[in-house]
Image (cartoon, rainbow, N blue to C red):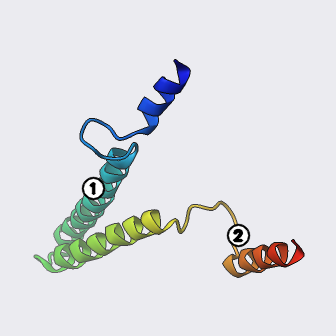
């Protein structure tokens, strides 16, 4: 009975998506929208402060969109998930040493 429950929680949901896909989709959407909104707001505030009409709004809109896309790329590729210093070349060398030793 426990096995049936485990299979239901790990399998696809009722929409046919793998478990956790909805969470990933939600985070991707949030990252993209938040970058654009924050960049646009800061640009709007700077335009009001300096008296330049659409200059900072347009610049920071695109900068916020680029930051959102960068965050999505980092999330999807797994970059930036390790805490502290992470040396990819050292990890690969250690993996090769383990394979050579076996």
Q: Residue furthest top?
A: 1
Dot 2 lies on which element?
A: loop
Q: How would you rate the neighbour count of disc 2 (Cα within 10 Å): few for under 14, some for 14-19, many for 20 or more?
A: few
Write the residue at 69% across / 64% down: 84
Q: Where's residue 26, x and y in %?
A: 31, 49
Q: Quadrant of residue 62?
A: bottom left
Q: Is residue 14 above or below residue 25?
A: above
Which residue does the numbered mark 1 point to in the structure image?
29
Q: Residue furthest right?
A: 101
State the residue in front, 11 or 92.
11
State the residue in front, 84 or 96.
96
**Nearest to N terminus: mark 1 or mark 2:** 1
**Circle 1/circle 2 CB separation < 8 Å:** no
Q: Residue 80 vs residue 33: left or right?
A: right
Write the residue at 67% across / 77% down: 88
Q: Where's residue 8, x and y in %?
A: 42, 30
Q: Quadrant of residue 37?
A: bottom left
Write the residue at 25% across / 58% down: 33
Q: Which mark is residue 85?
A: 2
Write the residue at 83% across / 72% down: 98
State the residue in front, 50 or 29.
29
Q: Residue 86 vs residue 50: left or right?
A: right
Q: Quadrant of residue 60?
A: bottom left
């Amino acid at each position: 009975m426990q096995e049936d429950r485990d299979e239901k929680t790990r399998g696809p949901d009722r929409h046919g998506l793998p478990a956790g896909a909805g969470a990933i989709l939600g985070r991707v959407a949030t990252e993209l929208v938040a970058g654009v909104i924050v960049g646009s707001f800061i640009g709007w505030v700077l335009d009001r402060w300096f008296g330049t009409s659409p200059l900072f709004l347009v610049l920071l809109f695109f900068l916020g969109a680029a930051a959102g896309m960068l965050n999505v790329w980092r999330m999807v590729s797994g970059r930036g998930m390790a805490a502290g210093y992470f040396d990819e070349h050292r990890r690969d060398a250690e993996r090769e040493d383990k394979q050579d030793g076996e």
